[in-house]
Image: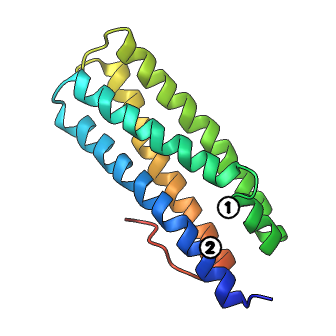
Amino acid sequence: MPSDVDRTAKAVDRVQPQRDALREAHHAFAAACESAADSVALADALTALRSAFDLHVEYAEGGGGLFEELLDDAPAEAAPEVDRLKRDHAVIATAMDRAAGLLGEGAGIDDERLAGVTAEVVRLLAQHRRRGAELLYNVYAVEIGAGD
């Protein structure tokens, strides 16, 4: 039977590559929002972010995924936070869909609606990543870099 240290190391090893990919896409999207270069660059960054986010959701919520593992290891502590993180996934996906819709309608980089929704995507993802890092810390007592 694996020790708690082995299970913790396994969980962190599993989460880190996926977390790194989402972080990089998140930062690239934020940079594209800030640069106000053009809507094509922003759309490309959003596409890359959505791809990384969709993989993140599958990794977390899919069968045998991280949420299932957390609920097995610490059901009382993890359950409310897992529920919140799942709700975050839906809210973030909806915000990304709004941004993609505005870009698809031809909204330019100077469109206030687009600026608002892209800023919301950046904020929601940062908040979600912090919550996820806090949950992993609370369950496994391992710091994975909440504010990276």
- Indicate which disc residue 92 carries: none
Q: Which residue is mark 2?
A: 11
Q: Quadrant of residue 7?
A: bottom right
Pointer 1 with pointer 2, Cβ within 8 A: yes
From what the image shows, is residue 116 above or below residue 90? above
From what the image shows, is residue 27 above or below residue 48? below
- SS category of the residue bearing label 1: helix
From what the image shows, is residue 77 above or below residue 128? below
Q: Which residue lies at the image location 37% right of the left edge and 20% below the top edge?
A: 113
Image-based side of 117 in relation to 86, left or right? left
Mark 1 surroundings: few (<14), some (14-19) or many (≥20) residues within 10 A: many
Amino acid type indicated by mark 1: Leu
Mark 2 surroundings: few (<14), some (14-19) or many (≥20) residues within 10 A: some
Q: Nearer the viewer, residue 110 or 79?
A: 79
From what the image shows, is residue 127 above or below residue 89? below
Mark closer to the chain start, 1 or 2: 2
Image-based side of 29 in relation to 147, left or right? left
- Indicate which disc residue 66 carries: 1
Q: Quadrant of residue 14?
A: bottom right
Q: Which residue lies at the image location 31% right of the left edge and 13% below the top edge?
A: 107
- SS category of the residue bearing label 2: helix
